[in-house]
Amino acid sequence: MSHSPADLLITGCTVLVHDDQERIAFEQDAAIVVRDGRIESVSGAAETTATGLAALEHIGALEHIDARGQVALPGLVNCHTHAPMVALRGLAEDLPTEEWFNDVVWPVESNLTEKDVELGARLACAEMIRAGVTCFADHYFSMDTVAAVVAECGMRAHLGEAYFSSQGPQGREKSLEFALRHRGSVDGRITTALAPHAPYTVTDADLAATALLALEHSLPVHLHAAENRDQTHTSLARHGLTPIEVLDRAGLLATDLLIAHGTGIIDRDLPVLERASGRTAVATAPRGYLKFAWPDTTPIRALRALGIPVGLATDGAASNNSLDVWESMALTSLIQKSTEGDPRWLRSRQALHHATLQSARAVGLGDSIGAVAPGRRADIILVDLTGPHTQPVHDLAATLVHSARSADVRTTIVDGRVLMRDRELLTLDVPAVVRELGDRLPALVDRSHGRRIQEYDT
């Protein structure tokens, strides 16, 4: 351990840790030392606090957080979202999927300007920071603008410039150029992916070209596929293949692939996924499935049996109304119990595993985030469990998953930098964003032009 002062010392907390079998455990009355954006040590308070507090007395730059009564967790990861779509929150309600896209969302998205995307991204990042999300995987348009917001606000992000085949070759080329230009930027806080929209909006030829580009440039791919069972049935009727089999034929299962939703994954897809030569992961966003009245959810139990990570997500706030991964964690556990008819699945510790290590792996960051452990990036949240709704604590994992709320997150830290302390955002001005976005809303939501950027017809 270095004798120079640490950047950040967190004392008195209970820390969620993973043992060598990745089982969830909790270390009481612990201290976390952060140096140069990484976790240097996680140890008993008696071992570290005296040194840390002595340093505090002499070095004003050393930051100390007294976290008694709080739990330190790895920062949450939103494994699939469209952050700027917070500007459309509540605009398209109580509609089937096809009408939601064709009648409201895609006509409104044809109005989007870079300024709208910027303001939406700022509001989304503020919402996520306040909810303990330190990293998000975004799949949208004008992503240079989103990258600039990420750089400024201090979050971590996995970004992809979305494209449809209707844009012509330049859509795919723009996605590649963005990914190459931004990967590893802002001290590694931004990673990138190629981002074809979905098999029903991107041709087989474009999917195959994307796979080749991904392999050539060592880039992952992030797309929607088998979002619901209707898409799978339509794909079988039209092509004789499921959406997962379409991806396989295009060569995308040889890439590092993040599949959004996957509620339409069926039994015949499982051996296809099992023999994939790339690293495949799935992101589940259960609130939206309930809202669209989809009869199925992501088959987590079957995917876990294949060793496929399933990360937690919210999708965009236009469909989910929220970017609250904390809620996604609780809903995932509850819906899995109902779907499987088994109250022993998904247990609280399993849900926490999905929220931490599995979500980190889903976005390709399984070696650097997802755990509070020496050597990992210092993406940490502190959760206050002193409220009446979280007391008494008989089972800490159950309290975190089923009783705690995103509003219980007191402090959010990314790369050792405090982005929110005691519920105060330090890197974003929400009232200013809300005012400016409000002024722009009439032009943004106008649908009188009759245009839409795409047709939803799976």
Image: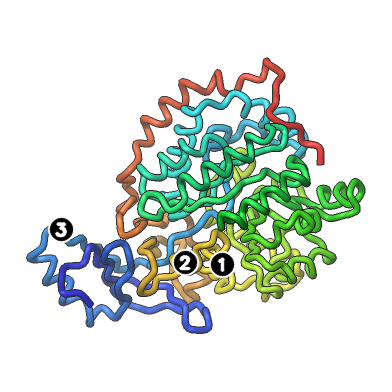
For marks 2 and 3, give the CA distance. 27 Å
**As drawn, is 265 to the left or to the right of 53?**
right
Whether residue 4 sits left or right of residue 19 in the image: it is left
Task: Look at the numbered disc 3 and give the secondary structure of its residue.
Answer: loop
Mark 2–mark 1 contact, CB under 8 Å?
Answer: yes
Of 85 and 349, nearer the camera is: 85
Q: Residue 45 vs residue 21: left or right?
A: left
Q: Nearer the viewer, residue 148 or 446?
A: 148
Residue underneath mark 3 = 61
Q: Could you classify mark 3 by the number of other residues whose Cα lies within 10 Å: few (under 14), some (14-19), or many (20 or more)?
A: few
Can residue 204 be seen here? The reply is: yes
Please give the name of the residue rendered at 16% of the width and 74% of the height, measured from the top-left corner.
3
Query: Which numbered dot is residue 251?
Result: none
Question: Cβ–Cβ below 8 Å for labels 1 and 3?
Answer: no
* Residue under numbered circle 1: 358
Percent position of residue 179, x then y: 52, 47
Vertical relation: 160 (above or below) 60: above
User: Which circle marks residue 370 in the picture?
Assistant: 2
